[in-house]
Image (cartoon, rainbow, N blue to C red):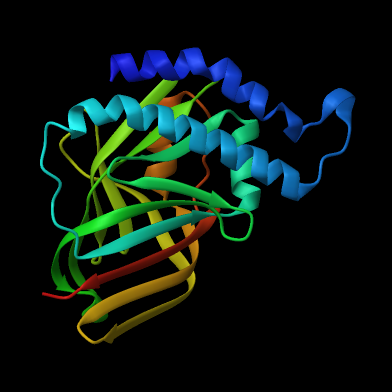
Amino acid sequence: MSRLRTRLVLAGAAALAAVTVLTGPAGAAVTDEAATADAARAAVRIAQDAAAEAGVEARATTPAASIGSAVIREDGDFLRRSAQAGIFVIPLPPGTPAYDSAAGFSASFPVTGATGVLREYYGNVQLDGSLLAVNLRTGRAVVYRQLAFDIDSWQITGVPAGGTAPVGLLTPSGDSTVSVAGGVSSLTSAGLTVTTEGAQRLNQQLATDFFRADVKVGSFALSYTQG
């Protein structure tokens, strides 16, 4: 983690320079579309750099077989505000980042296991990959591993590096649909918000006050073959 943090901090100036267009030269106005694109491209660049570092560890392990996928999609508003604060939350392998002008910025994770039943609202869905949260202004960073969607609490959880207990980070909100078809269980949620616990932990770990409970991050989609 120390090598990764060092590389991210050194890359911080360049990444922040890439998003200074968010405020425009000499206070010039910038469109939301351009600001979102700049923030997303900066996030993808940081994710690629982090992935290259994490790949050293990842190559030493055998990837688990995937039975589905989970996709976190960030709203343009949240992405712009987080970039302005120097905050980026990005996936690490085998999680992957993506950006296009129509779909926006997203983080995808393979589903590697599931217990319980999504439609009956109990159990746990295990995700491969990790989440890296970094504050480029303070040089603080934290990695959450053992990602999962905890059906009982209806939260995306992760275990912070050096910890043992999962932390509830995000929760689907708003209009949500749960379905089962052809042996595939699916959840689509128009909203995804920060939990109270997630906001407290991330603010403490990144030395910021950016995160707020119940603030919308984006949307969430989960699908996997029910065993």
Q: Is residue 68 visible?
A: yes
Where, by quadrant of the figure, is residue 80 drawn?
top right
Q: Residue 28 placed where, x, y %? A: 89, 32
Q: In the rendered view, does 22 fall on the left or right side of 196? A: right
Number of numbered discs on residues: 0
Where, by quadrant of the figure, is residue 54 drawn?
top left
Q: In the rendered view, does 177 fall on the left or right side of 224? A: right
Q: In the rendered view, does 13 fall on the left or right side of 53? A: right
Which residue in the rendered view is the most extreme toward the bottom?
A: 181
- Where is the C terminus found, in terms of image quarters? bottom left
Where, by quadrant of the figure, is residue 120 drawn?
bottom left
Residue at image coords 43%, 63%: 220
Vertical relation: 135 (above or below) 172? above
Q: Residue 182 placed where, x, y %? A: 23, 87
Q: Choose between 158 and 24: the one closer to the eye.
A: 24
Q: Residue 201 placed where, x, y %? A: 37, 35
Q: Choose between 52 and 210: the one closer to the eye.
A: 52
Q: Residue 125 placed where, x, y %? A: 21, 62
Q: Is residue 203 visible?
A: no
Vertical relation: 4 (above or below) 174? above
Residue at image coords 53%, 32%: 87
Residue at image coords 43%, 56%: 72
Vertical relation: 121 (above or below) 1? below
Residue at image coords 36%, 73%: 187
- Where is the N terminus found, in terms of image quarters? top left
Q: Choose between 208 and 49: the one closer to the eye.
A: 49
